[in-house]
């Protein structure tokens, strides 16, 4: 089979562009991703139908079997999804979710409190973005449903908390990955004496997108800044339509499941708490095993840098599911009700699994086309030095949007940003690296083919394209704020000036949104 690379060609942009445009126009995610995959296969094989068919077969097989062994990362993530679906369904049939909603009526007294609770939980559960979106969604859904908050709004609360928190948290799977990348970059450029963790901490206030995405999210929750498509979803939710029922059940939904009258609040909190504790335990121990095998001393940061994320999530979900089962047996639920819950929970995750597998497939196609490298090559021309931070932010955003991966964008763009800084002014190294991190999260937030965006939709039980469309205006507003900030930072070289510029535009934006939302 003759497979080619199009790293030097704008044609490499065609598959993601086709998938994204079709998804927005047709709102049929699987169809759109499938067309994008086929277009990519045809490009890679010079439009040979036979080779394209073989390539597609190998791509599908690679989702399960890769390099002569099971693809453990993919299978464990899918296993985690199925387990979480079963845990959520059992919590529902046990009556624990309803008991929690009843309990919350006396403690969470308004729609605003429900949204703030979701944001708070998202900030606390910062270990991993997948974990954040799915677990916080499971906890928050009974409360946000009670107060008629649309599933699109819940998905926005989850997605715009998860990645921004993870990208600025050193003790997370994201933080450890970024620190490892930055460490290698700094060492390669002669900054081996720099403390990698301290450098990461210095970069936190330079990540304008993450900071102001969280601040805008807080303002949206506090002041009800519902604009664009989000406004209609919230109006529909007030009437009891939490999601667009004409599109069927969204991923992760468990409609029409019977609920026992004997449920207790502990039936929700104990399984979720067990899931969190067990997952963190497995993340630390799996990372510690790698450190020990390499003869390195144990540190928490080192453990997170070397952790096996998918394995930890899967093992943690098994423990969480076991505790959930024990609780429903103690509650003496009927066996047929338990079986019905387990089957319904697993089945509810199938739409998310299908979308995720298609997203992984198109990511593999895009990787072979080297779309990211082509996007990165666009910054090698003659660009004024002062504009480099903002240009890197925009390009990282487009790259992450096109490829559906912020981590892949980090890996491609961070070394390029460092090389450009060393070739002009090394003092701008950290701002330029930060601009890449910020842009990658922005692009990830906007991309319908992003796995983190898909799982935020799943965590909220929201139709995926509805989530993408409703979150987009807010992401674009924060991106505009960030563009102003990085432009000022580039010309002044002052972080304070950049933050002040962002803050001024942020205040103006919030006032404008408040005026629009009350029209």
Image: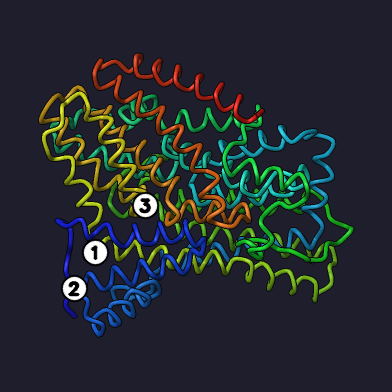
Q: Mark 3 falls on what kind of element? A: loop
Mark 2 and mark 1 residues within 8 Å of each other at the beta carbon = yes
- How many residues crowd around disc 1 within 10 Å: few (fewer than 14), some, or many (20 or more)? some
| 454 is higher (above) or lower (below) than 182 | below
- Give the Cα separation between the discs numbered 2 and 3: 23 Å
Question: Which residue was labeled with disc 2?
Answer: 3
Give the mark nearer the N terminus: 2 vs 1: 2
Give the mark nearer the N terminus: 3 vs 1: 1
List x then y, in percent, for residue 338.
76, 70
Nearer-the-camera pick, 25 or 394: 25
Question: Which residue was labeled with disc 3?
Answer: 405
Which disc is residue 204 wearing? none
Can residue 303 be seen from the camera position used here? no
Residue found at the far right of this picture: 261
Q: Is residue 41 left or right of residue 72?
A: left
List x then y, in percent, for residue 397.
34, 42
Question: Which residue was labeled with disc 1?
Answer: 368
Mark 2 and mark 3 residues within 8 Å of each other at the beta carbon = no
Which part of the image, by quadrant, shows the C terminus?
Answer: top right
């Amino acid at each position: 089979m003759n497979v080619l690379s199009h790293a030097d060609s704008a044609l490499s942009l065609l598959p993601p562009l086709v998938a994204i445009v079709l998804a927005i126009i047709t709102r049929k995610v699987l169809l759109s991703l499938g067309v994008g995959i086929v277009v990519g296969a045809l490009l890679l094989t010079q439009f040979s139908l036979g080779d394209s068919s073989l390539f597609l077969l190998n791509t599908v097989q690679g989702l399960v079997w890769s390099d002569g062994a099971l693809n453990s990362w993919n299978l464990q993530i899918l296993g985690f999804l199925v387990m979480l679906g079963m845990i959520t369904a059992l919590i529902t049939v046990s009556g624990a979710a309803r008991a929690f909603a009843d309990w919350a009526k006396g403690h969470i007294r308004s729609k605003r409190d429900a949204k703030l609770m979701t944001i708070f939980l998202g900030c606390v559960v910062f270990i991993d973005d997948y974990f954040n979106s799915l677990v916080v969604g499971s906890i928050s859904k009974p409360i946000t449903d009670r107060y008629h908050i649309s599933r699109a709004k819940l998905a926005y609360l989850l997605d715009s908390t998860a990645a921004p928190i993870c990208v600025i948290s050193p003790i997370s799977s994201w933080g450890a990955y970024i620190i490892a990348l930055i460490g290698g970059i700094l060492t390669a450029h002669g900054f081996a004496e720099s403390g990698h963790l301290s450098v990461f901490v210095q970069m936190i206030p330079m990540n304008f997108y993450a900071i102001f995405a969280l601040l805008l999210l807080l303002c949206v929750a506090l002041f009800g800044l519902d604009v664009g498509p989000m406004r209609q979803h919230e109006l529909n939710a007030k009437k009891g339509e939490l999601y667009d029922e004409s599109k069927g059940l969204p991923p992760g939904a468990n409609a029409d499941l019977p609920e026992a009258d004997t449920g207790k609040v502990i039936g929700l909190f104990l399984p979720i708490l067990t899931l969190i504790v067990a997952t963190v335990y497995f993340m630390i121990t799996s990372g510690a095993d790698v450190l020990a095998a390499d003869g390195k001393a144990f540190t928490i940061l080192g453990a997170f840098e070397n952790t096996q994320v998918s394995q930890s999530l899967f093992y943690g979900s098994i423990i969480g599911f076991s505790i959930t089962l024990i609780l429903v047996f103690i509650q003496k639920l009927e066996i047929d009700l338990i079986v019905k819950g387990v089957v319904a929970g697993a089945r509810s995750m199938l739409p998310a699994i299908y979308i995720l597998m298609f997203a992984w497939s198109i990511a593999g196609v895009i990787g072979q086309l080297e779309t990211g490298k082509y996007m990165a090559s666009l910054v090698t021309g003659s660009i004024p030095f002062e504009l480099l931070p903002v240009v890197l932010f925009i390009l990282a955003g487009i790259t992450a949007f096109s490829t559906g991966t912020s981590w892949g964008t980090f890996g491609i763009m961070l070394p390029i940003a460092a090389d450009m800084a060393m070739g002009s002014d090394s003092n701008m190294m950290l701002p330029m690296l930060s601009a890449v991190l910020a842009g990658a999260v922005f692009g990830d937030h906007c991309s319908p083919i992003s796995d983190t965006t898909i799982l935020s939709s799943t965590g909220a039980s929201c139709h995926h394209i509805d989530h993408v469309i409703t979150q987009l205006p807010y992401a674009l507003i924060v991106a505009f704020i960030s563009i102003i900030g990085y432009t000022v930072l580039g010309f002044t070289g002052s972080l304070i000036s950049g933050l002040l510029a962002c803050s001024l535009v942020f205040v103006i934006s919030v006032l404008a949104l408040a005026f629009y939302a009350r029209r």
